[in-house]
Image: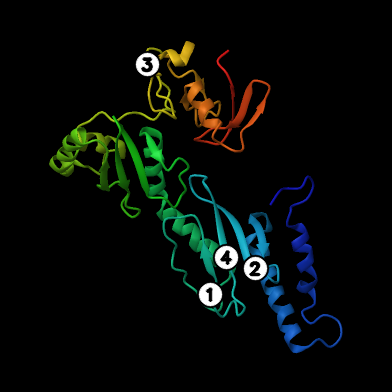
Amino acid sequence: SSHGATRHPLSRRRSSLAPFAGRPGGSGAAAPAQTARVLQLRVRAAQIEEVGWGQLVSATGDDGVSCLTFRVMDEQRRHHLLEITLPMNYPACPPSIAADVPYLPKLQWSESSRLKDVLCQFQEHLKVLQDYWSTMDGIDKALWVVDPTKPTYAMSHHRIALGDDCYILLHVDTHKPNSLPECRFLGTDGKLERLIKNWRKNRKRWSADRKFHENLATVLDFALPQPPSVSIKDDQQADCGICYATHLPVDDELGTQSGCAADYKCENPSCSRAFHSVCLRDWLRTITTTRQSFDVLFGNCPYCSEPVAVKSTDS
């Protein structure tokens, strides 16, 4: 939901519930079912108030308050969305929850429990997952992750490029993130045989005291390639994020681009992927949302989706 200039976007929802807070029965003789419903809405509004309207992102459902989404921040200032669905007979029956985490906590619930108890339990669950997310962040920064290109907090699988069209598919243990992961090798047979042999021979050298990428390099006995987004020295060249080659082939059809290194860089500091402009141009032309104005193609970075622009011809 978008933020207004002067008031919280949910202030209207809050004010619509306010009348229930002061008069549970309403004026006149209300039907028993209506009175019960008004009381239920009053309870839910009071419990949202207890958590804080500032944390509420959305409130939906038939009555407007049966599906609530709250913003929760963990110890490392990562933002999470917790969706809480309240059953008709809440709080006699517990709510259900959904969030972008590897696994959900089992809620401890009683009839005296409140919404704030759900958020407190979720906060405690986030504390348990801090080491896991720190490990995954380290993998994303130190290794060349080709899949997923946009990892979520729930993902525990990463496909890492090892060069020469070889990859390792890792599954990180969410409970023991710095332990030896499950893995599968993908790619050309010659190099894979050596990597698999090293993995089997050196797996006992994996140490929980070392960083994940250091362990992986030790066990594979192999210098792991850095991600294209890592800053490189002046005498080095970055691989293109589309063709994965440092230089374009020497080919007369490429004209002035023949044999060239990557000459375009995403301007998003957290991405900074390098591309050959000819590769980026060809890729943008396959995307239906790409726009062209005069001799410039406008689209989105294949990795971070930030805007990119490249000339439609080499001239």
Mark 4 highlights which residue? Answer: 84
Image spot of residue 304 (x, y percent) = 52, 36
The amino acid sitting under disc 4 is Ile
Q: Nearer the viewer, mark 3 or mark 4?
A: 3
Mark 1 highlights which residue? Answer: 94
Mark 2 highlights which residue? Answer: 47
Mark 4 / mark 2, whichever is N-terminal:
2
**For the residue labelled by badge 3, is the local secondary structure a helix, a strand or a loop?**
loop
Rendered residue at 60%/32% (across/down): 299
The amino acid sitting under disc 1 is Pro
Mark 3 / mark 2, whichever is N-terminal:
2
Q: Residue furthest front?
A: 253
Q: Label 3 vs label 1: CA separation?
A: 58 Å
> Is residue 296 rendered to the left or right of residue 248?
right
**For the residue labelled by badge 1, is the local secondary structure a helix, a strand or a loop?**
loop
Q: Label 2 vs label 1: CA separation?
A: 14 Å
Quadrant of the image for the C terminus?
Answer: top right
Rendered residue at 52%/45% (across/down): 77
**Disc 2 + disc 1, Cβ < 8 Å:** no
Image spot of residue 27 (x, y percent) = 86, 81
Q: Label 3 vs label 4: CA separation?
A: 50 Å
Q: Nearer the viewer, mark 3 or mark 1?
A: 3
Q: Residue furthest left?
A: 201
Image spot of residue 209 (x, y percent) = 26, 41
Is residue 206 visible to the viewer in this orientation of the structure?
A: yes
**For the residue labelled by badge 2, is the local secondary structure a helix, a strand or a loop?**
helix
- Residue closer to the observer: 277 or 15: 277
Badge 4 crowding class, 10 Å Cα cut-off, few under 14, some 14 to 19, many 20 or more, is: many
Rendered residue at 45%/40% (across/down): 149
Q: Nearer the viewer, mark 2 or mark 1?
A: 1
**Which quadrant holds residue 47?**
bottom right
Q: Label 3 vs label 2: CA separation?
A: 58 Å
